[in-house]
C-alpha cells in the first residue's frame, strides 16, 4: 500500500485484550472495541533500525496500524485511547470491506508522563477503494519530518511546504471553525422571518465568507 521496505514490516496481530490491559479500559471503551473493531494488526514500524533515519524531537518511532472495522462509522474515542497510551505517532489504516481511509493524530509527548501522549486533533482521508489509498510515507530527512509530512498530506487544505506545521494546523483549525460559523448563519437566515434581522445575518455571513476566502488564499500552494 505504501511501498515501504521489507525491513519495516511487522505484520503482527494484536489481540484486543492487550489493548484493554494497556489502556486500563473501562466498560464503555471495551464495548466500543468489541462492537466496532474486528482486528488490529501492527503492520509497520519506522525507526532508526528499520529505515536508517534518525529520531528528531520527541519522534523516536512511527507505527502503522491496520484496523479492520465491523462498521464504517466508528468512534474517534477508539483511536484517541490508543494514541494517548502509545507515545509514538501512529498512522491508522482503517478498513471496512474493500474501502479504506487513513487517519493520524497530531500529538505530543506528555510533559508529566513520557509514556503517554497528549492528542490534539485528527486528520484523515475520505473512504475510498483500498487499492487507491496512497501516501508518500518516506517524505523527510528524519522521523519527525516524516511524521509532520504525513499530517500535511492529510490536511484538507494544503499549505506551502515551508510553512511551520503548527501554523498550518492553526490555519486549518480557523478554516474549520469559519466553515461551521457560515453553516450556522445560513441555517439561521433560512429560518429567520424578520427582514431586518435577515439583512444583519447576511452581512455577518458575507464577512465570515470573506475571512474564510482570505484564509484559503493566504496559505495555499502556488
Image (cartoon, rainbow, N blue to C red):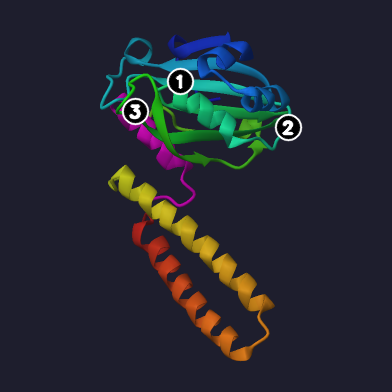
Q: CA distance from mark 3 to mark 2?
A: 32 Å
Tell whether position 30 is magenta. Answer: no
Q: Position of residue 129 (x, y in %)?
A: 67, 35
Q: Residue 153, relative to residue 54: is it above or below?
A: below
Closer mark to the observer between disc 1 and disc 2: 2
User: Looking at this view, is 204 or 32 the one in front?
Assistant: 32
Q: Position of residue 63 (x, y in %)?
A: 45, 20
Q: Residues within 10 Å of mark 1 (few under 14, many from 20)?
A: some
Report the side of 107 relative to 193 (left or right): left
User: Looking at this view, is 127 or 141 the one in front?
Assistant: 127
Under circle 2, the secondary element is loop
Q: Quadrant of residue 73?
A: top right
Residue corresponding to mark 3: 110
User: Looking at this view, is 142 or 90 the one in front?
Assistant: 90
Report the side of 51 relative to 201 (left or right): left
Q: Residues within 10 Å of mark 2 (few under 14, many from 20)?
A: few
Tell whether position 151 is magenta. Answer: yes
Q: Judge whether residue 113 can be spotted in this image.
A: yes
Residue corresponding to mark 2: 71
Point out the stretch of residues depicted in magenta. Answer: 139-159
Q: Residue at x 72, y 26 (%)?
A: 35
Looking at the rendered structure, which numbered label has been put on residue 63? 1
Under circle 1, the secondary element is strand
Closer mark to the observer between disc 3 and disc 2: 3
Q: Quadrant of the C terminus?
A: bottom left
Name the residue at the front extreme.
26
Q: Judge whether residue 2 can be spotted in this image.
A: no
Closer mark to the observer between disc 3 and disc 1: 3
Q: Quadrant of residue 171?
A: bottom left
Q: Residue 66, relative to residue 103: is it above or below?
A: above
Amino acid at each position: 500500500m505504501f511501498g515501504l521496505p521489507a525491513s519495516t514490516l511487522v505484520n503482527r496481530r494484536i489481540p484486543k485484550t492487550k489493548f484493554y490491559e494497556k489502556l486500563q479500559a473501562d466498560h464503555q471503551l471495551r464495548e466500543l472495541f468489541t462492537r466496532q473493531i474486528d482486528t488490529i494488526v501492527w503492520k509497520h514500524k519506522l525507526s532508526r533500525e528499520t529505515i536508517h533515519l534518525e529520531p528528531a524531537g520527541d519522534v523516536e518511532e512511527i507505527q502503522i496500524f491496520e484496523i479492520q472495522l465491523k462498521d464504517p462509522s466508528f468512534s474517534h474515542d477508539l483511536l484517541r485511547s490508543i494514541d494517548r497510551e502509545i507515545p509514538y505517532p501512529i498512522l491508522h489504516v482503517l478498513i471496512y470491506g474493500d474501502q479504506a481511509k487513513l487517519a493520524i493524530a497530531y500529538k505530543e509527548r506528555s510533559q508529566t508522563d513520557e509514556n503517554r501522549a497528549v492528542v490534539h486533533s485528527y486528520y484523515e482521508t475520505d473512504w475510498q477503494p483500498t487499492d487507491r489509498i496512497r501516501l508518500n510515507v518516506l517524505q523527510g530527512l528524519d522521523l519527525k519530518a516524516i511524521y509532520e509530512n504525513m499530517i500535511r498530506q492529510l490536511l484538507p487544505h494544503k499549505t506551502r511546504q515551508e510553512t511551520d506545521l503548527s501554523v498550518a494546523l492553526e490555519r486549518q483549525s480557523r478554516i474549520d471553525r469559519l466553515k461551521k460559523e457560515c453553516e450556522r448563519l445560513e441555517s439561521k437566515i433560512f429560518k429567520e422571518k424578520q427582514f431586518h434581522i435577515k439583512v444583519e445575518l447576511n452581512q455577518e455571513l458575507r464577512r465570515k465568507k470573506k475571512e474564510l476566502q482570505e484564509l484559503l488564499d493566504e496559505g495555499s500552494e502556488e
